[in-house]
């Protein structure tokens, strides 16, 4: 055998041995980084898991989600910015953060806008929710579905809050959201906007007296370690948005876009299911850790105290929009 023929055979053998590796490489799933604020065993994690499993299954493993829970990629503002910077492909974020990017979404932060959970879900699942998702595109974000956190309640370390006057002077962390800031200021509270990853430390150090979040968040973050009182104000319904980056979206074919959209809807529903469950047992769990929970809240008094702020919200979002939302059955 000539040297050339021997080299040729050796090369062919080497290529044959390498072939399976090569084809496996060709089928490597595309990695999708997904970020969210809370732990994997939270409503965020439940939504993210359902979303990723649905996409991975319906695309036959063409995509593989890598989860970054517990604010591992930064606060919610950074997460949303990361979508346009290209540092993350998918996020689940609360509406509190979203309205800095999509101002029209801020209407959902108006206190006592929604009567109850079925009302909020009907609004988000209807034309209003669909139209709002479409508005994200104007801001370079692809929002695919709504998920849920539940209704927000007040917690603090100073005193029980039964009526609006009791809350006066408390330093309460709020999301970086103008509607929340306006409402809390109106109640005589000192609203302190702060990114979520800083909140536990600020509560521990006494920089703030309290915060406000749904039962789902209070349980997930074990806020009983840093809070003594909770009032079931249910002042704001907190949806969350399931969003993908424009770069990812632009690279998908139609079938893949459908897989991501259907998967996001499944994720949104999974978060609602998680919230339904945690709402059943969460308050008892919070009490069992020594937190004094005020359940009998005079919501009418809170609404009345907010009257001047409602005038501002009507100017900002349009009375017609507020009325249309209220009219949804
Ligand atoms: O309060 C917030 O910032 C949000 O509700 C949180 C805790 C990040 C969950 O989205």
Image: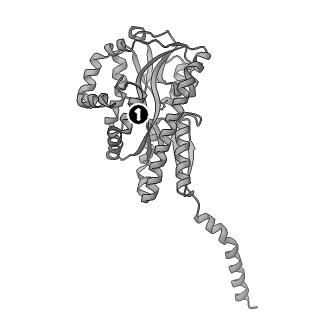
- Across and down, in percent, residue 140 comes to 36, 47
- Which image quadrant: the C terminus? top left
Image quadrant in which you'd find residue 124: top left
- Across and down, in percent, residue 307 comes to 28, 16
- Across and down, in percent, residue 236 comes to 40, 25
Looking at the image, the residue that sits furthest to the bottom is 2
Q: Which residue is drawn at 58% across and 18% down?
A: 284
The secondary element bearing badge 1 is classed as helix
Residue 240 is left or right of residue 28, and the answer is left
Front residue of 237/243: it is 237
Q: Specify few, some or many for label 1: CA neighbours under 10 Å numbering under 14, 14-19, or 20 or more.
A: some
Looking at the image, the residue that sits furthest to the right is 1
Front residue of 127/307: it is 127
- Across and down, in percent, residue 31 comes to 55, 53
Question: With respect to residue 130, does 16 lie above or below?
Answer: below
Looking at the image, the residue that sits furthest to the front is 329
Question: With respect to residue 42, does 209 lie above or below?
Answer: above
Front residue of 62/16: it is 62
Question: With respect to residue 206, does 321 lie above or below?
Answer: below
Tag count: 1
Q: Which residue is drawn at 57% across and 14% down?
A: 291
Whether label 1 lies within 8 Å of ligand 1 gets the answer: no
Residue 321 is left or right of residue 236, and the answer is left
Instruction: State whether residue 87 appears in this view.
Output: no
Front residue of 57/315: it is 57
Color style of the picture: one colour
Q: Residue at x 43, y 33 (%)?
A: 239
Check disc 1 and report the residue beneath it: 121
């Amino acid at each position: 055998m000539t040297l050339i023929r021997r080299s040729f055979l050796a090369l062919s053998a080497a290529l044959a041995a390498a072939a399976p590796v090569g084809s496996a490489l060709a089928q490597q799933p595309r990695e999708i980084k997904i970020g969210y604020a809370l732990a994997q065993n939270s409503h965020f994690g439940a939504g993210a898991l359902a979303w990723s499993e649905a996409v991975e299954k319906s695309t036959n493993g063409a995509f593989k989600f890598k989860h970054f829970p517990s604010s591992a990629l930064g606060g919610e503002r950074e997460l949303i910015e990361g979508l346009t910077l290209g540092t993350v492909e998918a996020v689940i974020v609360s509406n509190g953060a979203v309205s800095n990017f999509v101002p029209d979404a801020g209407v959902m932060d108006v206190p006592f806008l929604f009567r109850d959970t079925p009302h909020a879900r009907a609004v988000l699942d209807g034309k209003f929710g669909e139209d709002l998702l479409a508005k994200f595109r104007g801001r370079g974000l692809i929002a695919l579905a709504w998920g849920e956190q539940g209704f927000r309640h007040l917690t603090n370390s100073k005193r029980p809050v039964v009526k609006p006057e009791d809350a006066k002077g408390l330093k309460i962390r709020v999301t970086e959201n103008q509607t929340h800031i306006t409402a809390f200021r109106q109640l005589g509270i000192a609203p302190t906007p702060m990114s979520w990853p800083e909140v536990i430390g600020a509560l521990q150090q006494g920089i703030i007296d309290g915060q406000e979040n749904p039962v789902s968040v209070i349980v997930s973050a074990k806020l009983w370690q840093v809070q003594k009182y909770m009032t079931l104000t249910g002042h704001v319904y907190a949806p969350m948005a399931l969003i993908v980056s424009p770069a990812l979206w632009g690279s998908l074919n139609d079938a893949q876009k459908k897989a991501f959209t259907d998967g996001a809807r499944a994720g949104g529903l999974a978060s609602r299911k998680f919230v339904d469950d945690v709402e059943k047992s969460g308050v008892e769990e919070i009490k069992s850790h020594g937190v004094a929970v005020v359940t009998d809240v005079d919501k009418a008094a809170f609404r009345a105290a907010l009257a001047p702020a409602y005038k501002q919200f009507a100017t900002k979002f349009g009375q017609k929009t507020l009325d249309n939302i209220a009219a949804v059955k």
